[in-house]
Amino acid sequence: MNAHRSVLARTVSTPAVLILVLLAIALIAKLSGSSPFERTVTELFIRIVLVVGLYIFIGNSGVMSFGHVGFMCLGAYGTAWLTIPPAMKKFALTGLPDFILQHQAPIALSLVLSPLLAAVFALLIGRILMRLAGIAASIATFAMLAVINTVYSNWETVTGATSSVVGIPMKTGVWLSFGGALFAVIVAYGYGISRYGLALRSARDEAIAAAASGVDIERQRLIAFVISAFVIGIAGVLYAHFLGVVNPDAFYLSLTFISLAMLVVGGMNSLSGAVIGVVAISAVIEILRTLEKGIPIGEATLAIPNGVQEIAIGIAMIVILIFRPSGLMRNRELRWSRWPFERASENK
Amino acid sequence: MTAILQIVFDALSLGSIYALGALGIALIFGVMRLVNFAHGDYISFCVFAMLVPSTDAMSEMFLGSLPTIVLIPVILLIGAGVSVLSEIIVFRRLRDANPATMMIASFALGFILKHFLLMLFSSRPKSINLWPDLGLPVEILGARLPLLQLIAIGITIIILVALSAFLKRTRFGLEMRAAAENFTMARMLGVKANQVILIAFAISGMLAASIGLILAAQTGTSDIQMGVSVMLVAFIATVIGGLGSLAGAVVAGYLIGAASVLMQVILPLEARPFRDAFVYAAVIACLIWRPQGLFAPKSAKQRV
C-alpha cells in the first residue's frame, strides 16, 4: 500500500524525470554543436539554479522574497575575488585582504566558498527578517536587496563600484551549468522531503495548526532561507564564470522580476513548476529576442520594436496569475509511476 | 543655527516626498491588502506624461507646456487614471487571491509600465523645465532655502490635512476607514466594495502624481528610475509605520527622510556613498525592536 512505501520511493520519480529532461536538453545542445545555442542552454541552466533556489524558500514557506537575487550578487562577487588572477586583482580591487590578493583559487573551491559566503550572510540577516510576518518580511527582503546593491555599487576598492569587474575565468559551459542545475534540483528535492521541508510546508498551509503541533516557524523559515541562499550563490558563481564580467546592476530589479516571473508562471509551490517555468519563459524570451532582431521575409525584415519582449512577459505573468494562479504545473509535481518506479506490490 | 535650519528643512522636504509615497501605498494596502509595487511607476508615468514621447536626447515639453493652473489638475488626473485603470484591468480580477499573488501581479504591472515608458522615451534621463522661478532661494531666519523646498513642504502639509479631513469627515472617508479596519464586515454593513477601492486607487494615484510634480520641479530631470527609488523607501516606511496604519506611514516617511539627511551630515566622508545602506540597515534594526512596526493598528494583529 502507499502508506507502507517510504516517502523517497513514492516521490523520487519527480527529480528523476526533471533531471532526465535537463540531461536531454544538455545533450541536444552538445550535439547541435552550435555555440550560440550552447550559450542559450548554459544560461537556461543557470536560471534553473536561481529559480530552484528561489523555490526552496518561496515555494516551501509561502513567503514572497524580492531579495534573493542579492545572494546571487554575493556569490558572483565572491568568485570574482577568489578566481581573478592576482596580476589583475592587484590593480582593480586594491581593497581586498592581502591573502586573497596574492592567491588564485580554483573554480571548484570557489564553488563551495562563494555560495557559503551567501549562506552565512543569509543566516545573519535571516535571523532578523524571519521574525517578520509574511508581507512585512517580503518588503524587508527588498530592503536587503537594496542594501546589497548600494554597498556593491559604491565600494570602489573591493567591488569596483558600478564599473564591471573583469578577468573572471570563463569556465561555465553546458556541463558545468548542468551540474549546477542537477545539484539544485537534488538539494531542493532532498530538502522538500526532509522533516524540515515538511514542517515548513505545514506552516505555509496552516500556520496556527503547525505552530500548535510544535513547528518553530521562524527556525524552519531560516533553514530554508539559508539553503536557498547557498543554491542561489552557486547560480551567482556560475553566472560570473559564464560572462567573465560582473556588475552590481545585473543583480537588481530586472533579474528579480524575471526570476519571479519564471517561478510564478511555472507554479510556485512545486519543484517541477520552478523548472518548467524557467524552460517556458526562456523559450518565450528567445523567440521574442529573435523577433526583435527581425526575421527576413523576402525583401523586407519583419521586426517587433525593442521592449516588446519585457512587456509581453509582464502581460503573460499577469494573465497566468489571473487565470491560472497555480501556474502551468498547477502546483503538482511531474511523476512517472511506471517502470522502474512501479510499486513492487502492485501486481500482487 | 542656519546650518541646523538648513538640515531641518532638507529633512522635511525629503520626508515629505517619502510620506506622500508611503501614504499612497498604505491607502491601497488598507482597503485591499495589496502591496502595490507599481506605485513607483505611476510616479514616473506622471513625470513622463509632461514630455513629448521621443527617444532623442533633447526633450520637448508636451503637457508640461500647459499653464500651471491647468497642468496640475491634468497631471493629477493622469495619475488617478493610471491607478484606477490598473485596478479595473488587473487587481479587480485578483480580489480573492492571496496577498503574495497580488504583490507579484503589481510587480509585473510596474515592469510593464516601466518598459512601456522605456520604449517611448529610452532610458536616457531628460531635462524637464518646470517652474524655473521656484528654484530661486529665499531667506528665512538667515538660512537661504530654495522656494521650491518650502512649497513642497507646504503642499504636503495641505495634502495631509485635506486627506485626513476627507477620511474623518466625509461618508467616503468613513467607509474607507471601515473597509481598512475589517473589509468583510464593512461590506456586510453596506459599504460598496468596488466604489471604496476605486476611490482609494484614485487618491493613491493623485498622491503619486503630486510626488511626480514635486520631483520633476526639484530635480529638473525625468529619469525612469526616479519613481522606483522613492517607492522603495515608501515601502519601508509603510512597514516601519505598521502595515495598514496611515498615520504611521506618514510619520515613518518623515523619520526616514530625517534619518537620510542626518546621515548625510554625520557620516564620515568615505562612508557617505553608503548612506542608503545605513538607512536600510537602521530600518532593519528598527524591525528587530518592533517587528510589527511602530504604529501597528489593532486590526493588523494576527488572530489565533
Image (cartoon, rainbow, N blue to C red):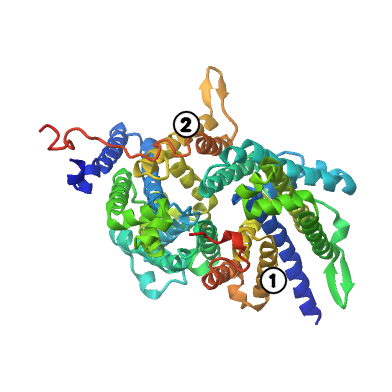
**Callout 2: residue from which chain?**
A
**The furthest residue to the top:** A298
Residue under label 2: A287
**Callout 1: residue from which chain?**
B
State the SS at label 1. Answer: helix
Q: Label 1 to label 2, Cα distance in Å?
A: 48 Å
The quarter holding residue B14 reads bottom right
Give the number of the mark in front: 1 or 2: 1
Residue A14 % position (x, y): 27, 41
Amino acid at pointer 2: Ile
Q: Is residue B283 left or right of residue A262?
A: right
Q: Is residue B226 visible?
A: no
Residue A79 % position (x, y): 38, 60
**The furthest residue to the front:** B189
- Compared to A60, does A95 lie above or below? below
**The furthest residue to the left:** A348
Which of B94/B263 is in front? B94
- Compared to A155, does A44 lie above or below? above
| Marks 1 and 2 share the same chain | no
Which of B67/A195 is in front? A195
Residue A297 % position (x, y): 53, 19
Q: Is residue A5 left or right of residue B155?
A: left
Residue B258 is marked as: 1
